[in-house]
Image (cartoon, rainbow, N blue to C red):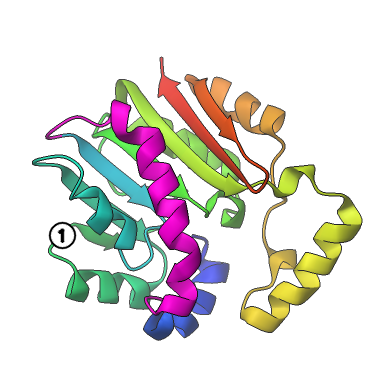
Amino acid sequence: MEKSTAHKFDRVAKIYNTPIFQFYYFFVHRSCINFLKNYLKDNSSVLDVACGTGIFLKKLSKEKRGLQLFGIDNSEKMVSIARRRSDITNFKVANAEKIPFEDNSFDLITIIDAFYYFQNQKAAIKECSRTLKPNNYLFIFYPALDILPRCILTQMKFVSRLFFFNLEEYSAFPKLKELEKMANRNNLKLIKKKFTTMHRLLLLQKI
């Protein structure tokens, strides 16, 4: 996540793992794992971008044997909690626009409910492509706000300010075609998608 959002997540880090926050993610994470299970192999290396307190990686660790799991987040307090509460030790404070790993490092990169926070989405896609191994996958999950009328989005932005976050500061929710263009410019091809009333699940392959 961008530096401009890090302090906002620092504010909620202590309560982020509580049921009131995680009720939503209980269903989100299960949907993501079900979507990915046929693309996840034993011993795969996985990077979760904007990993928060590491909850998704912890769930993922139970799905396959020997997964090499890594997480980055720009909130120092989120990362601190992830390190303290998880058996996974590979957490770093970093953002999607400058991923601190070598080229061709990962079999799978996940971005769950965070892509719209990135102020430079093009740079984030470029970095994901750089650090992915050839023929492997970038998974993006995000709410289906790209289909909502502008008036409703404006109301949501107003309500969001009551809950710690100000969506006015963030990048626009991308249209699917815009996201595909960004991906194609960086050797990523959309190979699978699932649309629900509320969410988008996208799988892109590095070619």
**SS for dot 1:** loop
Q: Residue furthest left?
A: 66
x and y, in percent, of residue 20 in the image: 48, 78
182 vs 104, left or right, is right
Q: Residue furthest right?
A: 151
Q: Which residues are magenta?
A: 16-43
Q: Is residue 146 visible?
A: yes
x and y, in percent, of residue 156 in the image: 77, 66
Q: Nearer the viewer, residue 99 or 55?
A: 55
Q: Nearer the viewer, residue 30 or 155?
A: 30
- Residue 29 is one of the magenta-drawn residues: yes
Q: Is residue 98 visible?
A: no
168 vs 47, left or right, is right
**Relative vertical location of residue 173 with respect to residue 58 in this rendering, above or below:** above
8 vs 205, left or right, is right
x and y, in percent, of residue 109 in the image: 35, 39
Q: Quadrant of the C terminus?
A: top left
**Relative vertical location of residue 87 with respect to residue 132 in this rendering, above or below:** below
**Relative vertical location of residue 160 with respect to residue 39 in this rendering, above or below:** below
Q: Residue at horizontal 33%, vertical 56%?
A: 56
Residue named by callout 1: 88
68 vs 92, left or right, is left
For mark 1, does the 10 Å Cα neighbourhood hold few (<14), some (14 to 19), or many (20 or more) residues?
A: some
Labels in figure, total: 1
- Residue 136 is one of the magenta-drawn residues: no
Q: Amino acid at mark 1?
A: Ile
Q: Residue at horizontal 85%, vertical 63%?
A: 154
Q: Residue at horizontal 42%, vertical 22%?
A: 205
Query: Residue 103 is drawn in which quadrant?
Result: top left
Q: Residue at horizontal 42%, vertical 43%?
A: 32
Magenta stretch secondary structure, dominant: helix
